[in-house]
Image (cartoon, rainbow, N blue to C red):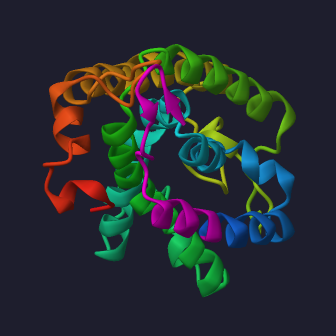
């Protein structure tokens, strides 16, 4: 990477992290494709996994920002629900599958990425900067995926097995039965509004406030990023935490 009049720009993401994440994806992608099928990659979290893979190698602030704006809040909720489920007090039921003994421990182990991916995205945005176009891009992508999942993908059923059903919770929070609090269309319409405006938008504003702004020509231009990338920065700021 060459800076305008500045010579080569050092990589902002450690090679060790790129290789480790790529190795994880080299395992997850074929395993998920074999066990769950291609429709599994319509889940928001799996889309984010793939975009992050491209983003870390391209060092694209836009791609990692799209993922951060879209899934930080839902994935943190997943982590909280997982801990609550493990303690015997489930909150939403979204992680009940992690405690299903009929699913292999290997598959459940791969799914633990839900717990560490949000922290990885925070690190990546901190290194690359936050691209303010991310909210609009994620909102458009999310709405398209919601329509596909609601109208074209299978709804919940009593014994779904490994077949992806109720993708992105378009029928409710359970994969075995649709929610009955609202008409199906009202639940779906609510997701179309809530995900961009009440979930992604606050995350977007928080990232603007906390993170350096991405620059088109320089690694990052904020004082925080300068401290990270300057030769005098401490070693702790040069790799994953």
Quarter of the picture holding the N terminus = top right
Range covered by the magenta-colored residues? 1-23
Residue 109 in sight: yes
**In the rendered structure, does residue 40 fall within the stretch colored magenta?**
no
Q: Is residue 172 visible?
A: no
Q: Is residue 119 above or below residue 129?
A: below
Where is residue 25 drawn, in percent x and y? Answer: 66, 64
Q: Quadrant of residue 182?
A: top right
Q: Is residue 32 left or right of residue 99?
A: right
Comparing 8 with 138, the one in front is 8
Location of residue 178 (image quadrant): top right
Residue at image position (63%, 41%) is 51
Q: Quadrant of the C terminus?
A: bottom left
| Residue 183, above or below 96 | above
Q: Is residue 172 left or right of residue 203?
A: right
Q: Nearer the viewer, residue 230 or 73?
A: 230
16 is within the stretch colored magenta: yes
Residue in view at x 39 percent, y 24 percent: 218
Q: In the image shown, does 137 or 10 lie closer to the viewer?
A: 10
**Residue shown at 54%/47% (left/top)?**
56
Residue 121, percent from left and from top: 41, 46
Place of residue 6 in the rendered image (x, y in percent of width and height, measured from the top left): 40, 27
Residue 107 image position (x, y, % from top left): 65, 77
Whether residue 161 sits left or right of residue 179 in the image: it is right
Describe residue 78's horizontal placement relative to residue 190 as left or right: left
């Amino acid at each position: 990477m060459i800076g305008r009049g500045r010579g080569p720009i050092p990589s902002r993401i450690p090679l060790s992290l790129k290789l480790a994440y790529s190795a994880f994806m080299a395992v997850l992608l074929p395993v998920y494709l074999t066990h769950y099928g291609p429709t599994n990659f319509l889940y928001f979290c799996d889309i984010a996994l793939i975009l992050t893979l491209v983003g870390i190698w391209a060092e694209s602030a836009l791609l990692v920002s799209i993922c951060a704006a879209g899934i930080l809040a839902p994935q943190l909720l997943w982590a909280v629900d997982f801990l609550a489920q493990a303690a015997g007090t489930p909150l939403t039921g979204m992680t009940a599958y992690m405690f299903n003994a009929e699913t292999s421990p290997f598959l459940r182990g791969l799914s633990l990425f839900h717990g560490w991916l949000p922290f990885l995205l925070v690190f990546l945005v901190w290194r690359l900067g936050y691209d303010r176009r991310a909210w609009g891009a994620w909102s458009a992508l999310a709405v398209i995926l919601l329509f596909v999942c609601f109208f074209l993908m299978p709804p919940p059923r009593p014994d779904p097995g490994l077949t992806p059903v109720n993708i992105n919770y378009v029928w409710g929070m359970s994969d075995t039965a649709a929610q009955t609090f609202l008409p199906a269309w009202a639940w779906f319409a609510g997701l179309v509004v809530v995900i961009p405006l009440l979930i992604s938008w606050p995350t977007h504003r928080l990232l603007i406030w906390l993170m350096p702004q991405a620059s088109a020509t320089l690694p990052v231009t904020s004082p925080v990023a300068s401290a990270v990338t300057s030769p005098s920065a401490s070693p702790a700021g040069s790799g994953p935490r």
